[in-house]
């Protein structure tokens, strides 16, 4: 077998195969397997969607991420994709620089006919095989021969599906080094402090998704490292901040940021003050060219509610509601609906009780979580259970679909409730 | 942990896939010279590819991939694994019809 083939070699085969050179475009591409040492075993095929194709064509970075015990994901700057290997029974021969028909000297005038149904055209070309061999050789110019190497043959490729970023690891990473105040910094293991890049490296999420989550879990950049605040410390700082309202007799919608930061900078590092202010306030009004803020009332109330609920055990609901109301700044309104996702109530008992039950304390694994939810409370309404399971919801699988899959629906006193799928 | 990044220079080349049923077997497993697989022609009339492969003629067609593909290359340097985007594939030549055997007396290349 020769390394390169000449026009005559190719013509001979055309004739043996009973094809007609006059029906073919002027270029023949000879497909070859390169010598073993030139085959590239390090190539992989990945299936793209339009978004990924654009990202690649724009030269943007794609990153594969995964520990040995994790399924690999592919991240762009803003999205995360699940990676799965798919098999095909066909051989996929990968050929760089292969010329498609349009580039092999195709006559422009016939291109319009090329849309005919392919199967019938197969038949036509097959018919032509049976025609008598007319003489194609001899007087013609040599055929254009191009040799094309098959860099590898594939039987598998990778399928990508958009998925939710896997963020539970982020909290685990940051929980090892919670910030508890400057006086306790000496006790923090410096090896457990993470920079942004280190976190991005380890968490299966894109930059944009990670940024959102860092803000959501209230991670604060303190001296290059992202930290979350210890609950008690967060309470301390928030209390300092809220105390200023009364001290300065501020209206609730006229909180001064400068004043807040200035008054507390001796007590709390500025990075933390600024972040806490951002987490807990929104812009309210501008007076005399000064931007004023107001506290996010629901957020403040929920946090202070959690503070009251931290001690284990159940509380008398009526007493709790009173204590809670007394704990928030004057003018803010507490209500039972704000307890959704942080506490559960039982109204069948006498007295009625409430106890702390936080989403963040539940198992990550969905089956275990449902098991625990139904152990805690046999029957849930959609509104009650939603805060505990909506983290699993996706565009395709909303909370209702999740409940259909993992729970049993029934009706109790005209209200739709969900209970465990398999009860003993 | 393995983290890899695929970066392309602008203007990613477009490669092609030739999809065949079954497997193309070579006589020698590890040839030191390039081995010819077959001759690929296109019909003037309808742009369809025809591939002469050993004793067989395969009629195919050019198909736009439903999902384009990227060809990525695993590169390991300094113990870190990177994937580099080498090319994208948007079209393939699919040969799914039954190969037609060539009936002739002699074939001096197979």
Image (cartoon, rainbow, N blue to C red):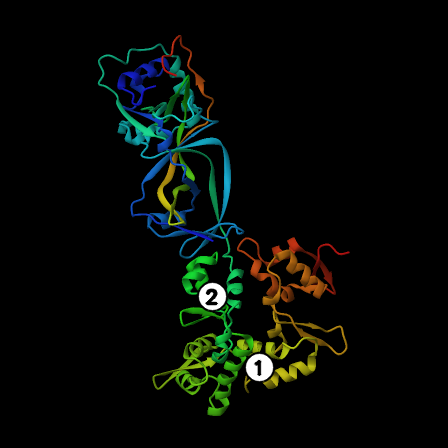
**Could you tell me which secondary element the residue under label 1 belongs to?**
loop
Q: Residue at x 36, y 32 (%)?
A: A37
Q: Which image quarter holds the N terminus of chain A?
A: top left
Question: Is label 1 on the same chain as label 2?
Answer: yes
Name above or below for residue A52 compared with residue A152.
below
- Circle 2 chain: A
Query: Left or right of A272: which side holds A38?
Result: left
User: Percent from the top left, x then y, of residue A225?
Assistant: 43, 69
Name above or below for residue A321 compared with residue B13.
below
Q: Dot 1 corresponds to which residue?
A: A333
Few, some or many C-alpha atoms within 10 Å of disc 1 (few <14, some 14-19, many ≥20)?
few
Q: Which image quarter holds the C terminus of chain A?
A: bottom right
Q: Residue at x 75, y 72 (%)?
A: A348
Few, some or many C-alpha atoms within 10 Å of disc 2 (few <14, some 14-19, many ≥20)?
few
Q: Tell me the distance, in whole angstroms, between the alpha carbons under discs 1 and 2.
A: 43 Å
Residue contact at pointers 1 and 2, CB within 8 angstroms: no
């Amino acid at each position: 077998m020769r390394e390169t083939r000449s026009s005559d070699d190719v013509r001979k085969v055309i004739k043996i195969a009973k094809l007609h050179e006059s029906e073919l475009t002027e270029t023949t591409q000879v497909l070859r397997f390169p010598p073993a040492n030139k085959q590239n075993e390090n190539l992989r095929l990945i299936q793209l969607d339009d978004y990924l194709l654009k990202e690649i064509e724009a030269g943007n970075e794609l990153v594969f991420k995964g520990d040995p015990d994790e399924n690999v994901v592919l991240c762009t700057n803003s999205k995360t994709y699940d990676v799965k290997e798919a098999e095909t029974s066909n051989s996929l021969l990968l050929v760089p620089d292969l010329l498609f028909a349009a580039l092999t000297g195709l006559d422009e005038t016939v291109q319009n006919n090329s849309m005919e149904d392919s199967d019938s055209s197969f038949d036509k070309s097959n018919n032509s095989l049976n025609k008598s061999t007319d003489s194609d050789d001899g007087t013609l110019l040599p055929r254009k021969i191009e040799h094309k190497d098959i860099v590898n043959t594939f039987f598998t490729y990778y399928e990508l599906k958009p998925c939710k970023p896997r963020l539970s690891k982020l909290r685990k990473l940051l929980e090892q080094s919670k910030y508890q105040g400057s006086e306790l910094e000496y006790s923090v293991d410096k090896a457990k402090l993470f920079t942004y890049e280190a976190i991005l490296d380890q968490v299966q999420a894109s930059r944009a998704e990670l940024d959102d989550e860092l803000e959501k879990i209230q991670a604060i950049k303190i001296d290059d490292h992202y930290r979350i605040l210890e609950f008690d410390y967060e309470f301390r700082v928030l209390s300092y901040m809220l105390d200023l309202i009364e001290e300065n007799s501020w209206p609730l919608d006229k909180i001064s940021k400068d004043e807040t930061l200035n008054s507390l900078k001796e007590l709390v590092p500025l990075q933390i003050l600024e972040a806490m202010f951002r987490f807990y306030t929104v812009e309210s009004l501008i007076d005399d060219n000064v931007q004023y803020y107001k506290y996010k009332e629901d957020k403040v109330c929920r946090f202070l509610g959690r503070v009251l609920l931290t001690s284990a055990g159940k509380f008398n609901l009526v007493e709790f509601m009173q204590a809670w109301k007394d704990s928030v700044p004057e003018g803010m309104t507490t209500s039972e609906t704000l307890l959704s996702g942080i506490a559960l109530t039982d109204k069948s008992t006498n007295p009625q009780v409430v106890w702390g039950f936080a989403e963040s304390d539940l198992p990550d694994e969905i089956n275990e979580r449902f098991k625990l939810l139904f152990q805690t409370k046999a029957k849930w309404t959609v509104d009650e259970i939603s805060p505990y399971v909506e983290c699993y919801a996706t565009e395709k699988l909303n909370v209702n679909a999740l409940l259909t899959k993992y729970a049993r629906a029934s009706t109790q006193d005209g209200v739709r409730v969900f209970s465990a799928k398999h009860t003993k | 942990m393995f983290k890899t990044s695929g970066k392309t220079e602008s203007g990613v080349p477009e490669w092609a896939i030739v999809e065949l049923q079954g497997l193309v077997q070579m006589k020698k497993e590890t040839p030191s010279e390039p081995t010819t697989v077959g001759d690929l022609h296109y019909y003037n009339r309808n742009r369809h590819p025809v591939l002469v492969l050993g004793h067989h003629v395969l009629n195919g067609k050019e198909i736009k991939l439903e999902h384009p593909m990227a060809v990525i290359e695993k590169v390991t340097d300094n113990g870190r694994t990177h994937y580099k985007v080498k090319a994208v594939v948007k079209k393939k030549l699919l040969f799914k019809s039954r190969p037609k055997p060539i009936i002739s007396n002699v074939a001096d290349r197979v």
